[in-house]
Amino acid sequence: MYQSKWRTITNHLILIIGSLFMILPVWIALVSSTHTREYLFQHGLQFWFGGHFIENYGAILFDPDATKGRVTALEMLFNSMVLGLGFAIGKVIISMMAAYAIVYFRFRLAVPLFWVIFSTLLLPLEVRIVPSYEVVAELGLLNTYTGLILPLIASATGTFFFRQFYRSVPDELLEAARLDGAGPLRFFLDILVPLSVTMIAAIFIIMFVVGWNQYLWPLLMTTDDQLYTIVIGIKQVYNSLYEGGQIPQFPKAFALTIMATIPPVLVVVIFQRMFVKGLVETEK
Amino acid sequence: MKRVQFGHSPVPYFFIAPQILIIAIFFLWPAAQAVYQSFLLEDAFGLSSQFVGFRNFADVLASGAWLQSAIFTAVFSFLVAFFSIAISLFLAVRADEVIRGAKSYKTLLMWGYAVAPPVAGLLGNMLFNPLMGDLYKLFNSFGFEFNHIQNAGDAAFVVTLIAVWKQVSVNFIFFLSGLQGIPKAVTEAATLDCKSAERRFWTITFPLLAPTTFFLMVINLTYAFFETFGIIDVSTKGSPGGSTATLVYKVYVDGFLGADMGSSSAQSVLLMIMVSVLTVFQFRFIERKVHY
């Protein structure tokens, strides 16, 4: 396509400015996390690396005092990993199964159950946090991984996506499978699941990032430090920044921020193509 | 539904059971509780409660604090949706045109999707830190007398800026895929007819992107309603004086920190109604979108 030279130059300029707008805050956090707190306090936020990378990150990863709790960033990373993976795996399995029942079977309660699932789309967890907390407390699930993950899986976004996908699978496949004598379970495991592999991967990536970044729910229900995710750790460090009249621990807060950001960003960048495909196709 | 299906059997119940079970326990039950509690008034110690009808709702709707929060939420959501959509559309159009480095730009602009809202909140909070924040210093060096800790308008600006920054990448992804869905023949024909890139954009590209834009407006409003909780909680915490507390943040503050269950539940129910209307609206639109 014809394009004037001027247009090409402005295109690049605009995109560079846009990229800088996105990256600068994280860049400043990254390089500022490698300075001492006294240095930052005197000279302000930095634009280039200092010499305290190992010291600051080592402290935050292995020393519980640095994160102002009884838990190190390493343990928080582990908790985040459990939350991200548990959420993604649980959501993919449960929604694949439910969508299979809705699309491939004729049964009496199909319509009412479909509407029950649909209704969860109307009300995100945020609007019913207080009663959700009470229910989980009554079940004795506070401060457990189960209580952390299951309520988050209750929303049906994944189910709708798989429903959409199954409906695009040709009917002939089921006819052929039935001629060959395959039952419902056989058809699901041997034909439908292998067909959905790319879709599963895309949903899995998105759900992992969504799970990793959960904030409000873990904040409410993890009162025990041992279950803190790294995103919750950020809030803890932030709360204690100005405590005790000392020079605020900005470098460690930044270090924690960077560590909370790197895993999901890496996942998104590495699996970029799959991720974009999943995002654009699910949300429509 | 499918033309070919399995016949009647207990099998589908087995497949749908896990989802229904989780929804019943962690969704229907709490939602019912919220509705129930919104009609109750607890005493100061939470020992007994009595049925008070719609009094909690009346109290909430009559209180200046809720109204203030509702107005802030509306203005905030509108600004976040507008600016994040405008910026990302602008960037996506340019990213769609460039040939050299297109892939790098795409990556550089979309990774922000993976940033957690509280992370964005903390970054913003640091950049606006009065002791050493670069943006705080920058604004004040222009003589703005910028002070987001005491000035409600400035605080709202900080929260909005962070929320927009966090949302640009999602919109960018959708716009770019929308742009790539426009047939090359259309853009080429337009280029022959009209030299002005700006005019081509407003008469050809923008109308063709209308479904995407509308869809993103709904997505962005939902985002501004709910997901900004993390941003607010780590940047302004609703201060000064509750001026930057969205409705969701207020439910949390009143219910968990203030332990006023009746009022918090009534607010939850009001939110549920508002969101349901928004979602139904969205689904109606998606049904209609097929005809574009």
Image (spheres, rainbow, N blue to C red):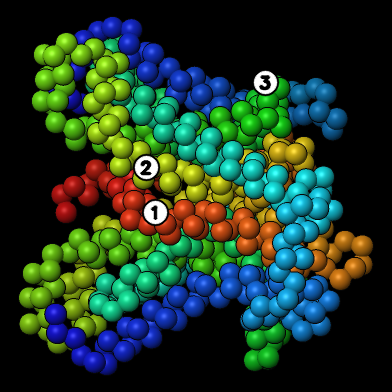
| Number of other residues with Cα within 10 Å of mark 3, as a class: few under 14, some 14 to 19, many 20 or more | few
Give the mark count: 3
Q: Secondary structure at mark 1?
A: loop
Q: Quadrant of the N terminus of chain B?
A: top left
Depicted A51 relative to depicted A90: above or below? below
Q: Secondary structure at mark 3?
A: loop
- When asked about the image quadrant of residue B204, the answer is bottom left
Q: Chain of mark 3?
A: A
Circle on res. A201: 2
Question: Residue B263, image x and y in percent?
Answer: 69, 38
| Number of other residues with Cα within 10 Å of mark 2, as a class: few under 14, some 14 to 19, many 20 or more | some
Callouts 2 and 1 on one subunit: yes
Residue shown at the point (68%, 91%) measured from the top left: B141
Circle on res. B256: none
Depicted B47 relative to depicted A272: above or below? above
Circle on res. A139: 3
Q: Chain of mark 2?
A: A
Callouts 1 and 3 on one subunit: yes
Question: Residue B128, image x and y in percent?
Answer: 68, 74
Marks 1/3: CA–CA distance: 38 Å
